[in-house]
Amino acid sequence: MATNRRIQSLEGLRGIMIFLIVLSHMEFLKYCNFSHAYELYWHNPTIAVDYFFMLSGFGMMYSFLKHGGVSAAGGQMYA
């Protein structure tokens, strides 16, 4: 039986960041009634991108260390 080793709260946070990044690329929203809010809050995805990469890097390092610091090729990276 396979166990789910993902941290669900971090997966949810990554999902929210992906949504914010996609939302920031929807340029047609600046022509809607709430264009001021779009330009002010959602058009700049810098923080969402930073958090997404930080959480992805944490997940990769967590997985790497959980497997004993062994790379996919089988060589040990850290002694």
Image (cartoon, rainbow, N blue to C red):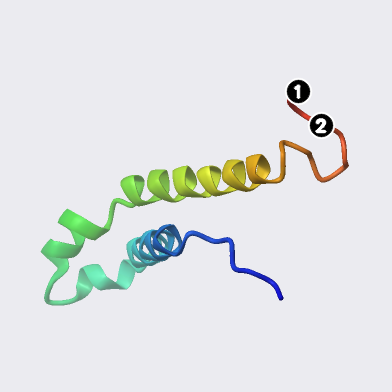
Position of residue 57 in the picture relative to residue 65 (left or right): left
What residue sits 12% from the left and 62% below the top? Answer: 36
Return the x and y of residue 26 as percentages of the image width and height: 35, 69
Asked if labels 1 and 2 touch by Cβ distance under 8 angstroms, the answer is yes
Quarter of image, res 23: bottom left
The 10 Å Cα crowd at callout 2, few under 14, some 14 to 19, many 20 or more, is few
Residue drawn 64% across the image and 45% down it: 66
Q: Is residue 73 left or right of residue 29?
A: right
Looking at the rendered structure, the secondary structure element under dot 2 is loop
Residue type at mark 2 is: Gln
Looking at the rendered structure, the kind of residue marked 1 is Ala
Residue 76 falls in image quadrant = top right
Q: Is residue 31 left or right of residue 45?
A: left
**Tag on residue 7?**
none
SS at mark 1 in the image:
loop
Residue position marked by numbered label 1 in the rendering: 79
Q: Which residue is mark 2?
A: 76
Residue at 87%, 42% in the rendered image:
73
Residue nearest the viewer, comparing 49 with 38: 49
